[in-house]
Image: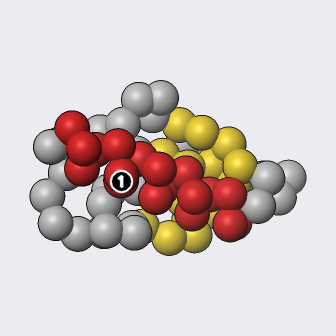
Amino acid sequence: MGSDLSFVRAMGSGCVIYRETSGRYVVDHPQAPPRILHAATLAGAYAACQGWEARLKRQGSLGSGGC
């Protein structure tokens, strides 16, 4: 990740949220393709994490833990 990002939150599911200097959020999850998504709001970033978590649980790729 570039130097124009600042760390916001790491979720229990492995999802990590960063904020760009432009104000947009970058969501990263090492186990879930597409690995990086952009969100306009923090709420959108959390929703991306929750969506990845739900999909990984259905696939059996995620243990207990959560957003």
Q: Which quadrant does the C terminus fall into?
A: bottom left
- Whether residue 6 sits left or right of residue 9 in the image: it is right
Instruction: Tell me which residue sits at (71%, 49%) in the image.
Output: 39
- Whether residue 35 sits left or right of residue 57 in the image: it is right
Asked if one can make out residue 3 in the rendered structure from this viewpoint, the answer is no
Instruction: Tell me which residue sits at (69%, 66%) in the image.
Output: 42
Q: Is residue 12 above or below residue 5?
A: below
Pick the residue in front: 13 or 47: 47
* Label 1 packing within 10 angstroms: few (<14), some (14-19), many (20+): many
Name of the residue lying farthest toward the top? 34
Asked if one can make out residue 67 in the rendered structure from this viewpoint, the answer is yes
Instruction: Tell me which residue sits at (21%, 38%) in the image.
Output: 59
What's under tag 1, amino acid-wise?
Glu
Q: Position of residue 11 (x, y in %)?
A: 39, 67
Q: Which quadrant does the N terminus fall into?
A: top right
Where residue 55 sits, quadrant-wise, is: top left
Q: Position of residue 4 (x, y in %)?
A: 71, 50
Name of the residue lying farthest toward the right? 22
Q: Is residue 40 above or below residue 31?
A: below
- Whether residue 39 sits left or right of residue 65 in the image: it is right
Q: Position of residue 27 (x, y in %)?
A: 55, 49
- Whether residue 23 sits left or right of residue 32 in the image: it is right
* Disc 1 target residue: 53
Q: Is residue 46 above or below residue 51?
A: below
Q: Secondary structure at mark 1?
A: helix
Where residue 10 sits, quadrant-wise, is: bottom left
The tally of labels here is 1
Q: Position of residue 33 (x, y in %)?
A: 41, 29
Pick the residue in front: 50 or 14: 50
Instruction: Tell me which residue sits at (63%, 49%) in the image.
Output: 26
